[in-house]
Image: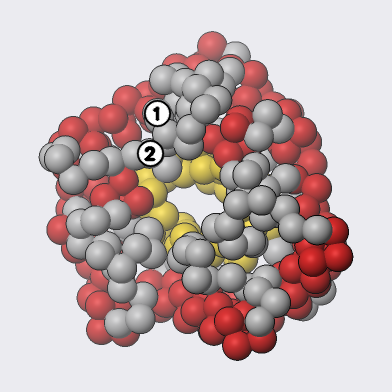
Amino acid sequence: MNPSLPWPVALSTGCFYRRPILDVLHAVKAAGFHQIEVCSFSAHLDYHDGAAIDRAARRLRELEIDPVSFHAPFADRIDITALDNAAREAAVAEVILACEAAARLGCTHVVLHPGPEREGRPPEAEFLQHMHHAAESLNRVAARCCQLGVALLLENMLAHLLFGHVRDMMYLLGEIHTCQVGTCLDTGHAHLARELDVVIQKLSGHLKMVHVNDNNGHRDDHLPPGDGGIDWRWFLGELRRADFHGVLVLELHGSDQETHDTILARALRARDYLERTFQEI
């Protein structure tokens, strides 16, 4: 727990997504982050490789870093809502493999985009088919997560994508019956959708985690809080009023051209900003 925040602050290793996880963990711990969300990008950590997962798990234990979550893979080819049975089965298998890797790492949560990385909304009949397949697939994934002892969290997606609005996510949550499923609120996604106030109200009863990042309302920039247009005093106050008891995960951008120290300095500045802002309220 952070001394001046009522919630722990973790760092997503997505800011190092093109660098092997074993190359960055020591720097992350040295910077003062004791909890992380593990990025599933293959150049960072290949969740298909059991030996690589085991090496990462050992290093996390050695450094006493708590992997609070694992971000499931997302790509256009991974579509658990696909109308094609073979494509959908392959996508579900891929997500379940990621959940098994998360458990092997010692993660307590898996964060999943419930829809594909595909723009636009098809005609209503086709959209409802996608919804039906999504619910069926999520029940299977949730059941496996229960077996593994990992909590599944659905993340609100960008507004231009299929299932990009909070009403879609609420429907899916209501259709999952095999296991209790929570939510992860991505502040940047909700801000771009102009739904941040609605999302926090709608998801508050299910909310277990927040992906903290900012933007100026035009692109998903993953800026540190305070560098974009989100009113963080208001947002942190709303979290407190919603009786939130989860983890804040800094999900910030990072480039290949930046050093570890530069990226981590930005993360530390983000954490400090959240602390100062919460003290003000």
Residue at the front extreme? 123
- For marks 2 and 1, the one nearer the N-term is 1
Q: Are there few (<14), some (14-19), or many (20+) residues within 10 Å of tag 2?
A: many
Q: Secondary structure at mark 1?
A: loop
Between the residue at mark 2 and the residue at mark 1, the CA separation in whole angstroms equals: 6 Å
Q: Residue at position x 62%, y 80% from top?
A: 88
Where does residue 118 sit, x and y in percent of width and height?
Answer: 58, 57
Check if mark 2's residue and mark 1's residue have beta carbons within 8 Å: yes
Q: Residue at position x 51%, y 64% from top?
A: 76
Q: Is residue 263 left or right of residue 153?
A: left
Reading the image, the residue beneath label 1 is: 224
In the image, what residue type sits under mark 2? Leu
Residue at the top extreme? 280
Label total for image = 2
Can residue 6 be seen from the camera position used here? yes
Q: Residue at position x 74%, y 58% from top?
A: 122
Reading the image, the residue beneath label 2 is: 252
Of residues 24 and 130, the one drawn nearer to the viewer in this rendering:
130
Q: Residue at position x 79%, y 66% from top?
A: 126
Instruction: State which quadrant residue 271 falls in.
Output: top left
Q: Secondary structure at mark 2?
A: loop
Q: How is the image coloured?
A: secondary structure
In the image, what residue type sits under mark 1? Pro
Can residue 142 be seen from the camera position used here? no
Residue 163's disc number: none
Of residues 63 and 137, the one drawn nearer to the viewer in this rendering:
137
